[in-house]
Amino acid sequence: MPNLGGQVGFGVTGIGYHGGVSEEQLRVIREVWSTVGKVVIVRDDQLDAVSSISGTGPAYFYYFAEQLTAAAAELGFTPEQSRLLAEQTFVGAAAVMQRSGGSSRDLLRYITNPAGTFIRAVREMANHDLKGMLVTAASATMVRAKEIAEEAESDSRAL
């Protein structure tokens, strides 16, 4: 299950396997897919969940970037400035996360001063249950993935 980031070498591909796959086969598969980014080996029954996070994840990211861009525009920036502020903020944050090797929690602690500005944003997002919304969204994508699989199976039986 590759994702959009694979187009630029920063994807994460979930590979599901079962007992009939040898270690050598798994090694070759991992090697092939690592050419487009990182690889995570999961149970077959976890592939829909992988898709709901990394496959659909770019949509969450783009939606969040779109909303941050709109917020910047409401604060008086031009459309070009708004896009640049949101885009480079995300690119920079992702690069720091990747290069530092730190967890998102560690990085949040590092940049969040209890008396500072960012803690207010974090509290607002927590008050609106951003995590709950993401879990609900990921669960909805898993439901849809199952529906698509059932539709495809039904179509193949009709042939």
Image: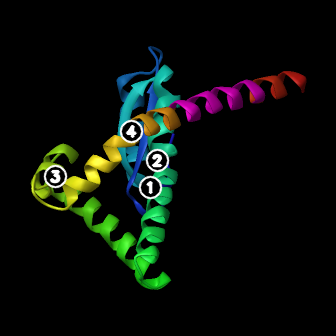
Dot 2: element:
helix
Kind of residue sitting beneath label 4: Asp
**Above-or-below relation of 94 to 92:** above
Q: Residue furthest right?
A: 159
Q: Tag 3 or tag 2, which sits nearer the N-term? A: 2
Residue that label 1 marks: 61
Select label 4 or label 1 by which is in front.
Answer: 4
Query: Which circle marks residue 57 in the picture?
Result: 2
Q: Residues within 10 Å of mark 2 (few under 14, many from 20)?
A: some
Q: Which mark is residue 80?
A: none
- The answer for how far apart the CA atoms under marks 3 and 1 are is 18 Å
Instruction: Point out the image quarter for the C terminus.
Output: top right
Q: CA distance from mark 4 to mark 2?
A: 18 Å
| Image location of residue 16, percent across then percent down | 46, 27
Residue at x 44% of width, y 43% of height: 54
Question: Nearer the N terminus, badge 3 or badge 1?
Answer: 1
Between residue 118 and residue 143, name the one nearer to us: 118
- Per the image, the residue denoted by label 3 is 107
Q: Which secondary structure, mark 3?
A: helix
Q: How did the renderer colour the structure?
A: rainbow
Give, as a single range, the part of the protein colored magenta: 139-151
State if disc 1 and disc 2 touch (CB < 8 Å): yes
Q: Nearer the viewer, mark 4 or mark 2?
A: 4
The image position of residue 8, as x and y in percent, is 43, 63
